[in-house]
Image (spheres, helix red, strand yellow):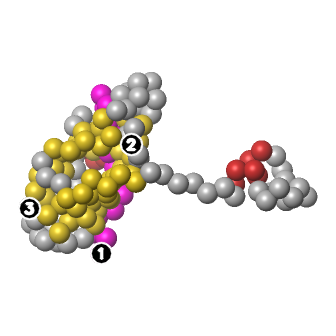
């Protein structure tokens, strides 16, 4: 036995990978306002805190031409207020960004770009995690 698979139960190369863990780098952006970069060369999971009423713009940076780049953004809101998030070159699922939480909760969205940021496709994964 090699610690990855049992020789008696192995059915090919796929079994070698099925028990290995998967991790991604997390980039903490801190408390943000205004315009912010999502540097996909630094990681693919981004966390940030946004206080009160705020309008935030994200721009995907350092994507690789002819390679699909993607990420997840976890936004923790503090306080209450009207919030907006836009994505440079963003094409939101459904045509426009969702209504974000108006209270102190967490919202999560994902994005990907197949063309070096010319088009950034954005989907809401969840709103109002408490």
* Mark drawn on residue 53: 3
Query: SS of the residue at dot 2?
Result: loop
Tell me whether the residue at label 2 lies in contact with that at label 1, contact meaning CB atoms closer than 8 angstroms.
Answer: no
Q: Which residue is mark 2?
A: 42
Nearest to N terminus: mark 1 or mark 3: 3
What x and y, as percent, mark residue 25?
A: 44, 51
Q: Nearer the viewer, mark 2 or mark 1?
A: 2
Picture quadrant where residue 122 is located: top left
* Residue at 10%, 65% in the rendered image: 52
Badge number at residue 110: none
Instruction: Say which residue appears at 44% left-offset and 33% top-offset.
Output: 68
> Dot 3: what SS?
loop
How many residues crowd around disc 3 within 10 Å: few (fewer than 14), some, or many (20 or more)? some
In this rendering, the answer to whether 36 lies above or below 130 is above
Q: Residue 130: which disc?
A: 1
**Residue that lies at the very extreme toward the right in this rendered image:** 8
| Chain-order first, disc 2 or disc 1 | 2
Q: Looking at this view, is 24 or 91 the one in front?
A: 24
Q: Residues within 10 Å of mark 1 (few under 14, many from 20)?
A: few
Asked whether, in this view, residue 3 is left or right of residue 59, the answer is right
Question: Residue at position x 45%, y 24% from top?
Answer: 66
Which is more foreground, mark 2 or mark 3? Answer: 2
Where is residue 11 shown, x and y percent of the image? 83, 50
Q: Determine the CA span between mark 2 and mark 3.
A: 28 Å
**Residue 78 percent location from the top left of the image:** 17, 69
Mark 2 to mark 1 CA distance (whole Å): 28 Å
SS under mark 1: loop
Quarter of the image that includes the N terminus: bottom right
In the image, residue 123 sits, relative to residue 52, either above or below, namely above
**Segment tinted magenta in the rendering:** 117-130
- Residue 28 falls in which quadrant of the image? bottom left
- Is residue 65 positioned above or below 107 on the image? above
């Amino acid at each position: 036995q090699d610690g990855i698979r049992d020789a008696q139960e192995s059915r090919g190369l796929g079994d070698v990978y099925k028990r290995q863990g998967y991790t991604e780098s997390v980039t903490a952006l801190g408390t943000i306002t205004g315009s912010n970069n999502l540097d996909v060369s630094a990681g693919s999971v981004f966390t940030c805190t946004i206080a009160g009423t705020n309008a935030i713009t994200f721009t995907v940076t350092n994507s690789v031409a002819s390679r699909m780049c993607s990420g997840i953004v976890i936004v923790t809101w503090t306080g209450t207020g009207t919030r907006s998030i836009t994505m440079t070159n963003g094409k939101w699922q459904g045509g426009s960004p969702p209504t974000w939480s108006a209270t102190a909760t967490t919202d999560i969205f994902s994005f990907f770009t197949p063309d070096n940021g010319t088009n950034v496709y954005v989907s809401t994964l969840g709103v109002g995690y408490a």
